[in-house]
């Protein structure tokens, strides 16, 4: 069947299926002429947590040998970017979307869909939810070369960490197979080359690393809400901190943290059917926009876009701007709230990260201007393990001391007889 616009539906092929657990499979996406446009070989490990009748359960599992290319994969048509979608289990998938310029291509984003109702993958799960998480992995390579990384590449997302191993991947193929040339990741060291080495030349000094600026005190927590014609569509309580890396006028690079002071800002926003926006403006010219989107099929909301405009007096370019419209953070079911007591750092761009403290947020359906049922972040779940482990160790120690005392007391009376 032809795809919309007259473009033929891509013919997809999965090679080397049925490999043993932990071995790399080769996934191939072909166009209507059976010409390969994407090839990828990798293994992946997923770490997350889910709900059971007895509480939260942590789990780590691998991409199984039965993983296969989905029909939603594409070589790109009608201005869309090429993508590789790999399905596994019952309703789980990994999606990789590519983009390019004149000289390089990159993974624009990698997203994972997990179906918690699949009890084979998530034993004793009491959840019927589908979780969608997304990451911008920072993987890029020169055109007409394959990207290779044998080292582990962890991708930290909200409520999940995906670790890639033994990655060889290439998009925009020119000869329907992997190119001989390759771009190696930094973790693996310098790329090998077949060109004879040139005479040694003085190596340039490495560029200076950004020097950290003064660390301000922890930002204060403030409460925000956005209302529309149908009532409140966003309720949030959180502390915000901006981490910005920039070049100063003396050509040195510095990373500074700026707290959002609720006493110096005005808040506003808008309510829409599929988008909810919170805008924070300060008297010093800072504009921070947090936009929440909705996954209607999974009935979940998430932080989709972060935008920052601000003025930095000592910067070489006084106006600093950053935006990311493809985020998948702070996720929860519609009608519930997302809560995280631990500090969360959201990487928006290479030069800007947003730190959140004591986050409690709910978007779209807010009843009675009160937070709904809480869905806690993975960081809070992990932090609970420490006091539980310490408490268990102390209880065990007390029990050992008590047993030793009773045994010693019994032996102390063994040499006496009753008269």
Image: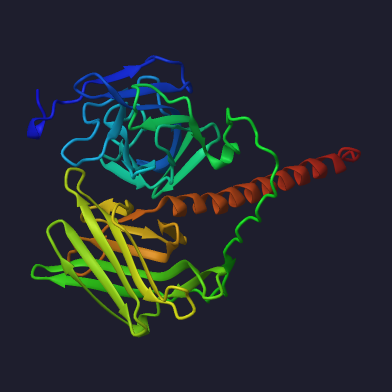
Q: Is residue 280 above or below residue 110?
A: below
Horizontal and vertical percent position of residue 204: 65, 53
Say which of 118 and 327 sits in front.
Answer: 327
Q: Is residue 323 visible to us here?
A: yes
Q: Is residue 19 above or below residue 130?
A: above
The residue shown at (49%, 79%) is 314
Position of the C terminus by quadrant? top right
Q: Is residue 123 visible to us here?
A: no
Q: How is the image coloured?
A: rainbow
The residue shown at (45%, 54%) is 380
Horizontal and vertical percent position of residue 103: 39, 42
The mark tally for this picture is: 0
Horizontal and vertical percent position of residue 304: 28, 56
Q: Is residue 196 left or right of residue 153?
A: right
- Identify the residue at the far front of this view: 199
Q: Is residue 138 left or right of residue 369?
A: right
Q: Is residue 195 above or below residue 267?
A: above
Horizontal and vertical percent position of residue 198: 65, 37
Position of the N terminus by quadrant? top left
The residue shown at (25%, 31%) is 75
Residue 4, located in which quarter of the rendered image? Answer: top left
Q: Is residue 130 above or below residue 279?
A: above
């Amino acid at each position: 069947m032809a795809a919309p616009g007259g473009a033929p539906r891509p013919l997809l092929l999965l090679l080397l299926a049925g490999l043993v657990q932990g071995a790399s499979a080769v996934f191939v996406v072909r166009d209507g002429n059976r010409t390969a446009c994407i090839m990828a070989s990798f293994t992946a490990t997923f770490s997350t947590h889910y709900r059971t009748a007895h509480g939260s359960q942590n789990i780590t599992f691998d991409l199984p040998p039965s993983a296969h290319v989905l029909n939603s994969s594409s070589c790109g048509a009608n201005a869309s970017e090429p993508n590789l979608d790999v399905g596994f289990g019952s309703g789980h998938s990994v999606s990789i979307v590519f983009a390019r310029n004149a000289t390089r291509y990159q993974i624009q984003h990698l997203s994972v869909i997990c179906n918690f109702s699949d009890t084979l993958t998530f034993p004793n799960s009491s959840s019927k939810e589908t979780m969608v998480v997304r990451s911008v992995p920072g993987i890029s390579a020169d055109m007409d070369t394959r990207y290779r990384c044998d080292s582990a590449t962890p991708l930290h997302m909200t409520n999940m960490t995906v670790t890639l191993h033994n990655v060889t991947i290439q998009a925009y193929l020119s000869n329907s197979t992997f190119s001989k040339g390759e771009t190696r990741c930094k973790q693996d060291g310098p790329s090998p080359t077949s060109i004879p080495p040139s005479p040694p030349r003085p190596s340039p000094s490495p560029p200076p690393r950004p020097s950290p600026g003064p660390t301000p005190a922890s930002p204060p927590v403030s409460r925000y809400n956005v209302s529309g014609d149908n009532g409140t569509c966003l309720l949030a309580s959180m502390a915000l901190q901006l981490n910005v890396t920039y070049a100063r006028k003396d050509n040195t690079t510095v990373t500074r943290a700026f707290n959002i002071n609720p006493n110096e800002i005005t808040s506003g926003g808008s309510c829409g059917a599929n988008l909810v926006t919170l805008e924070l403006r300060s008297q010093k010219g800072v504009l921070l926009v947090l936009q929440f989107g909705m996954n209607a099929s999974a009935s979940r909301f998430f932080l989709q876009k972060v935008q920052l405009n601000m003025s930095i007096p000592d910067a070489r370019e006084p106006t600093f701007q950053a935006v990311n419209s493809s985020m998948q953070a702070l996720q929860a079911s519609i009608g519930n709230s997302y809560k995280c007591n631990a500090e969360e750092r959201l990487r928006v761009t290479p030069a800007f990260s947003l730190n959140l403290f004591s986050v409690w947020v709910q978007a779209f359906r807010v009843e009675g201007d009160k937070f709904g049922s809480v869905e806690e972040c993975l960081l809070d779940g992990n932090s609970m393990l420490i006091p539980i482990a310490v408490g268990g160790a102390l209880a065990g120690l007390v029990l050992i001391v008590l047993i030793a005392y009773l045994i010693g007391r019994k032996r102390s009376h063994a040499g006496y007889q009753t008269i």
